[in-house]
Image (cartoon, rainbow, N blue to C red):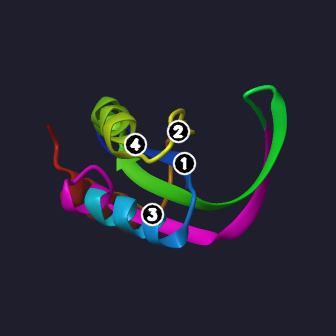
Amino acid sequence: MDDVKALTIAQTTCASTSDATALAEALVREHLAACVNIGPPSRSVYPWDGAIEVAEEVVLTIKTAAHKTEALKAFIETHHGYDVPELLLFTINDGLPAYLDWANDWLGQD
């Protein structure tokens, strides 16, 4: 599969479903994501400010184009509610052609 058709799956977390929904809608509206899945609340355990934190978070799975990842990073850094937001990127090199075409049509071929 060529790079133009490749997608990137990005993952981030938000503090609430309403925060996750607002972020997801903004990403799609700005053509930085073709689709964002918002998962149910999950429990996260992590170190923060010298203590072990346990918090409920909502996981977002963001489907974007490889050429949109830098813009996605900048958007998350600017619009996310966390001081240090999670953003993990995974390259998807294969999938159903119709889905990849649909996603790339929305995301544009910059």
**Helix, strand or loop for disc 2:** loop
Residue placed under numbered mark 1 in the picture: 12
Residue placed under numbered mark 4 in the picture: 6
Residues rendered magenta in the picture: 27-46
Distance between mark 2 and mark 3 Cα atoms:
13 Å
- The kind of residue tagged 4 is Ala
Distance between mark 4 and mark 3 Cα atoms:
28 Å
Could you tell me residue 1's position as x and y percent?
A: 42, 41
Decide if residue 61 is on the left or right side of residue 30: right
Which numbered disc flags the more N-terminal residue, 4 or 2? Answer: 4
Label annotation for residue 85: 2
Which numbered disc flags the more N-terminal residue, 4 or 3? Answer: 4
Label annotation for residue 62: none
Residue placed under numbered mark 3 in the picture: 19
Tell whether label 1 touches label 4 (CB within 8 Å).
no
Could you tell me residue 54's position as x and y percent?
A: 81, 51
Tell whether label 3 touches label 4 (CB within 8 Å).
no
Residue 102 drawn above or below residue 87: below
- The kind of residue tagged 3 is Asp
Please identify, in this view, whether the residue under mark 1 or under mark 2 is nearer the observer: 2
Q: Residues within 10 Å of mark 3 (few under 14, many from 20)?
A: some
Tell whether label 2 touches label 1 (CB within 8 Å).
yes
Which numbered disc flags the more N-terminal residue, 3 or 1? Answer: 1
Tell whether label 1 touches label 3 (CB within 8 Å).
no
**Helix, strand or loop for disc 4:** loop
- The kind of residue tagged 1 is Thr
Residue in view at x 34 percent, y 39 percent:
72
